[in-house]
Image (cartoon, rainbow, N blue to C red):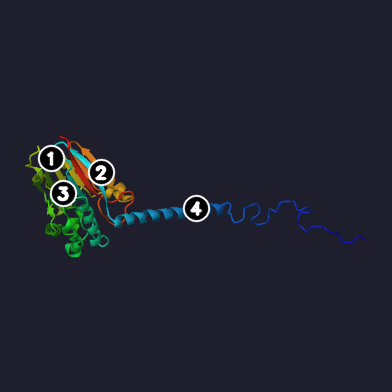
Amino acid sequence: MDGPATGSSEPGRPEDGTGTPDAGVPGAGTSSGTPSGPSRRLFVSRVVGGAAAAAALGTVGYGTYGVLRGPRVKRVTVPLAKLPRAAHGYRIAVVSDIHLGPVLGRGFAQKVVDTINSTQPDLIAVVGDLVDGSVKDLGPAAAPLAQLTARHGSFFVTGNHEYFSGAEEWVEEVRRLGLRPLENARTELPHFDLAGVNDVAGENEGQGPDFARALGDRDRARACVLLAHQPVQIHEAVDHGVDLQLSGHTHGGQLWPANLLAGAANPTLDGLDRYGDTQLYVSRGAGAWGPPTRVGAPSDITVIELASART
């Protein structure tokens, strides 16, 4: 009788050891630890989603840092046909939309003031939306404005947010701090006229813009620079022969989707533009409203350097 067979393989295993693994074995035919099929798609979607979330958080974080750090200086040359040669190179520091409030307080105001003074401007123009609160609450935060220094002084016009915060009280407060409010008024500087009009939000309080009062009887042979918070006021500026309007209000869009709304509501979102014989410059502003962050629209203080076309 033959004895037991020797050298036989275990049941279910190929005898020569060269066969492929059983297809029924879990994980067979795949690399160790790599998901396949639906599991792989879920893995990829989670990786992509996580990366997108990280990128979004990083972008918002950097935008917040940019606001809290303070605005950077932007320099723009604007030629004016009526500007005399003696005024060539005249510097106007334009700041808008500082939005002092619970987040951006006295320390932020000090950064803005120090940045403006470092540019050694001939004139300073604060074109509205200085605050988001009352003089009682934010008067101390605005106190550094008293340190603003320019050869021909500092001037102020109201923005729409002043009318949410007690415009009359703020006009008197900035006057006390040494700024000169231009409430539908004009002053004759040595080489050009400087005018300012109230914001359109003041119409609800009987304090709206009055272009005829500010500009109606001026000598149009002289160059004229107008301070007006909102870019939409450009059309009346054109009608009154203004050479350059300086505005803010838009924040340059600040962040999506506000940039789409601001772009639709304003003739110019930011930067220098021309309407007939009138040029319009819109600052992106120094602060932020709502969330203290900016994406794709960094804050600025603009130094406008006037250039004479007669040189």
| Earlier residue among tags 2 and 3 | 3
Pointer 2 residue: 271
Q: Residue at x 28, y 45 (%)?
A: 263
Q: Secondary structure at mark 4?
A: helix
User: Does the CB distance between marks 1 and 2 fall below 8 Å?
Assistant: no
Examine the rendered structure and indicate whether residue 236 appears above or below residue 26. Answer: above
Seen in the picture, residue 231 relative to 311 is either above or below; the reply is: below
Front one among 126 and 154? 154
Total tally of numbered discs in the picture:
4
Mark linked to residue 86: 1
Looking at the rendered structure, the kind of residue marked 1 is Ala
Q: Which residue reaches farthest left? A: 217
Query: Which element carries disc 1, helix, strand or loop?
Result: helix
User: What residue does disc 3 label?
Assistant: 123
What label sits on residue 45 in the rendered view?
4
Q: Quadrant of residue 88 in the image?
A: top left
Give the side of residue 26 with respect to residue 257, left or right: right
Of badges 4 and 3, the one in the foreground is 3
Q: CA distance from mark 4 to mark 1?
A: 65 Å
Q: Estimate the spatial distance between the alpha carbons at disc 2 and disc 4, rounded to whole Å.
A: 40 Å
Q: Secondary structure at mark 2?
A: strand
Residue 281 visible in the picture: yes
| Placement of the N terminus among the 4 image quadrants | bottom right
